[in-house]
Amino acid sequence: MREESKAVYPGSFDPVTRGHLEVIERARELFDVLHIAVASNPDKSCLFTSEERLELLRSETADLGGSGVLEFSAFEGLTASFASELGARWILRGLRAAADTAYELPMALSNRRCAQSGIDTVFLPAGAETSFISSSLVREIAAGGGRLEAFVTPRVEEALRGKFPS
Ligand code: ADP
């Protein structure tokens, strides 16, 4: 029997955007299990708590297409160690512009070095309609009271309005 293919998609997801959702929908076709892992780093201050970020990821992926099973959790520490603990063979990352590549490539190579069980990184290019989206831009627009429908789903927009009441 073929071994189950499992990937971890780690990120801050602060908050989840249409860009993340695009990547998740496509990656679900590639892996039997896609484990979405919210990085909860005590040194990094986030707008949303890890529980809130997980909750939004769960609700906004509920109606996505694709066949692979989605799992969710929050984690602290090294992604490669977390992936090993889960028994995942792959780390999934999305690539937008050249700046992402410059950051992601050394990270992928060091994760491959660090990981004891041969974990490798798979990159998916951002969607043409969503490649301009980042969570930091979304937070900035929300803080300024701008329109967010092109960037996030209505539920995430509502959660952002709760953080920045006008
Ligand atoms: P991190 O702090 O780990 O970069 P993010 O939530 O910003 O967390 O991003 C998580 C992953 O999703 C990264 O691989 C990032 O490149 C990817 N990503 C973020 N936004 C997009 C987008 N618009 N399109 C494709 N991939 C994206």
Image (cartoon, grey):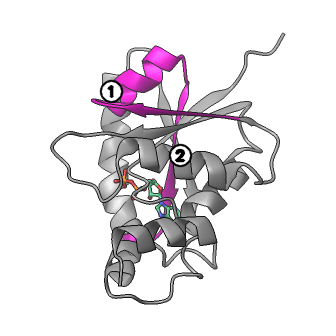
The residue that label 1 is drawn on is 113
Q: Is residue 161 above or below residue 62?
A: below
Query: Can you tell which mark lies on residue 55?
Result: 2
Residue at left offset 51%, top offset 82%: 148
Question: Looking at the picture, how far across and down is residue 132, in whole percent?
Answer: 49, 79
- Whether 77 is among the magenta residues is yes
Q: Quadrant of residue 81?
A: top left
Q: Is residue 17 left or right of residue 107?
A: right
Residue at left offset 77%, top offset 53%: 63
Question: Looking at the picture, how far across and down is residue 15, in whole percent?
Answer: 44, 60
Crowding near pointer 1: few (<14 within 10 Å), some, many (20+)?
some
Residue at left offset 40%, top offset 24%: 82
The three-letter amino acid code for the residue at tag 1 is: Arg
Residue at left offset 36%, top offset 77%: 165
Crowding near pointer 2: few (<14 within 10 Å), some, many (20+)?
few
Mark 2 or 1: the one toward you? 2
Question: Looking at the picture, how far across and down is residue 156, in whole percent?
Answer: 53, 65
Q: Is residue 121 above or below residue 134?
A: above
Ligand 1's quadrant is: bottom left
Q: Which residues are magenta?
A: 70-98
The three-letter amino acid code for the residue at tag 2 is: Glu
Q: Quadrant of residue 30?
A: top right
Q: Decide which of 5, 105 is in the foreground and name it.
A: 5
Tell me if I can see residue 32 in this picture: yes
Q: Is residue 58 above or below residue 130?
A: above
Q: What is the quadrant of the N terminus in the image? A: top right
